[in-house]
Amino acid sequence: MPAATASDPIVNRDFAEKFLTAVDRPFSYGVYFLFHDFWAEASQETIAAYTKLATSLPGAAELFEERYLADPITMGDLEACGPGTLGESFRHFIVDNGLEVNLARNYQDFNEELSQAGTLDRLPDELSYLAVRGFQVHDYLHVLTGFSSKPLGELAQSAFHFAQLQFPYNAFRIAVTTAHAAFVNPALSVDVMDALMAGWQLGRTCENIQFVRWEEELHTPLDTLRDKAGIDVSTYRSF
């Protein structure tokens, strides 16, 4: 095999075409497709860098060692939570937005199907696990930050996750959305950047809350959890 030269592409061009497909129509070719497509063609250096970032964060070592995944919860579990608790707020978020109370279960099955098919052979175990656990805690973190499930709220939430984890899924979402604003719909630019900045700044200034077992805090007052994490929802636009 000939040695690489300074003019050789770094980003695989087949993957770049898929990225541009997402940039063209972000809601038709979702970022989760890019996340799964990425590993087949990514450089080993980039994969190693993402893995190092994820595993070196404070609080990550215990989570990765235990591979903790919460048991499914029911709406009955949430209905038993008192006023003002995380559980009550989580129930309202799920019901008001028509979401699944156990979002991660379907993704975990999808992840396993892709793994068995060989699609994710180069996805490190740590990042595969973190993707599944990330789906488990995603909506809890929406409740804690106050960001909605609408497109700009999801963008702000993604920037929040990226600030705390530097996880590739969130990097791709930010890249796709900013590229779409730049090359397709510049009228989105102000709202997109405002959402990104709100999520990013919150993620950088509050405590890292990615590795908490939020399922064990359902009966804790939401305000108590926010105060402990340094989240003051009155100081930023919630989208």
Image (spheres, rainbow, N blue to C red):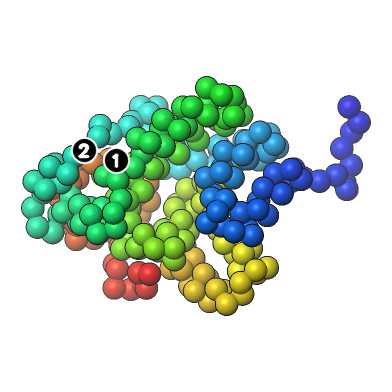
Which label was assigned to residue 102? 1
Q: CA distance from mark 2 to mark 1?
A: 7 Å
* Residue 61 visible: no
Describe residue 6's horizontal placement relative to residue 96 as left or right.
right
Describe residue 128's horizontal placement relative to residue 93 as left or right.
right
Q: What residue appears at the point 57 percent right and 30 percent down from the top-left corner? A: 120
Instruction: Report the front residue among 95 and 195.
Output: 95
Q: Residue furthest front?
A: 28
Tag 2–tag 1 contact (CB < 8 Å): yes
Where does the image place residue 51, in percent across and percent down from the top left?
A: 55, 37
Q: Quadrant of residue 153?
A: bottom left
- Amino acid under label 1? Asn
Instruction: Report the front residue among 112 and 235.
Output: 112
Q: Which residue is mark 2?
A: 73
Where does the image place residue 141, in percent across and percent down from the top left?
A: 33, 53
Lower sequence index among marks 2 and 1: 2
Q: What element does badge 2 sit on?
A: loop
Q: Is residue 189 above or below residue 219?
A: below
Q: Badge 2, how many Cα within 10 Å: few under 14, some, many 20+?
A: few
* Residue 155 visible: yes
Q: What element does badge 1 sit on?
A: loop
For the C terminus, the image quarter is bottom left
Where does the image place residue 110, in percent across and percent down from the top left?
A: 45, 33
